[in-house]
Image (cartoon, grey):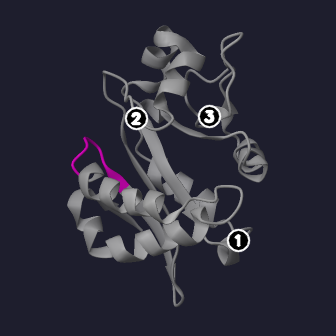
Amino acid sequence: MISYGRSVLDLADELVDAYADVFSAPPWNEDAETIRQFAGRLQSDVRRPGFRTAFAQSPAGIDGFATAWLTQAPFPQGRGYPQVAAQLGPERVRALLVGALGIDELAVRAYARGTGTGRALLTEITADAPHHRAWLLTSRLATDTVATYHRLGWHEVPALPGTETNVVVFLAPDHPGRP
């Protein structure tokens, strides 16, 4: 199911619970403060242009979710975005990411992994991405996650020489700028 804008705040507690369940475990190991920050980000992110959330539910609750919005210029400065900007350079950021749907979070609980939940969430949340332009970033240290994106047909954007970090940028399978 997909939700646009502020209506997702009705599920905020459940989304924060799923986020905590997924990202407090290895390889992420996020602490209570980072989880609290996600809860705060969700409150403000719903006001971003093009904000949407896709989520999967079962009798157990929220099995997984994804959040996304349209990447605006100037390119964001918080979290992992400066590393993305450094690795891609301003021209590729502008050409590949600005105006595209940026997937901010994708979280699938352990019991729902391997069932197609992540694939379904990505498909649903990117279904109306402008001109099939969607992207996401993840940590290279999350080797299973990186392998999953490759398996799902997402394309890794190579970093400019000498700018490699632990951040990996992926373009959606149908992104017109994929390598």
Determine which residue is flagged by label 2: 78
Determine crowd level at label 3: few under 14, some 14-19, many 20+ residues with C-alpha closer than 10 A.
Answer: many
Query: On residue 170, which mark appears?
Result: 3
Considering the image in quadrants, where does the N terminus appear? bottom left
Determine which residue is flagged by label 1: 115
Across and down, in percent, residue 105 comes to: 49, 52
Task: Report the amino acid beneath label 1.
Answer: Thr
In the rendered picture of this protein, how many numbered marks are placed on residues? 3
Camera-side mark, 2 or 3: 2
Furthest residue toward bottom: 59
Determine crowd level at label 2: few under 14, some 14-19, many 20+ residues with C-alpha closer than 10 A.
Answer: few
Q: Was residue 51 drawn as part of the magenta stretch in this picture? A: yes
- The image shows residue 131, relative to residue 33, as above or below, that is above
Picture quadrant where residue 173 is located: top right
Across and down, in percent, residue 44 comes to: 25, 52
Q: CA distance from mark 2 to mark 3?
A: 18 Å
Q: Earlier in the sequence, mark 3 or mark 1?
A: 1
Q: Was residue 39 drawn as part of the magenta stretch in this picture? A: no
Camera-side mark, 3 or 1: 3
Q: Which contiguous range is marked in magenta?
A: 47-52
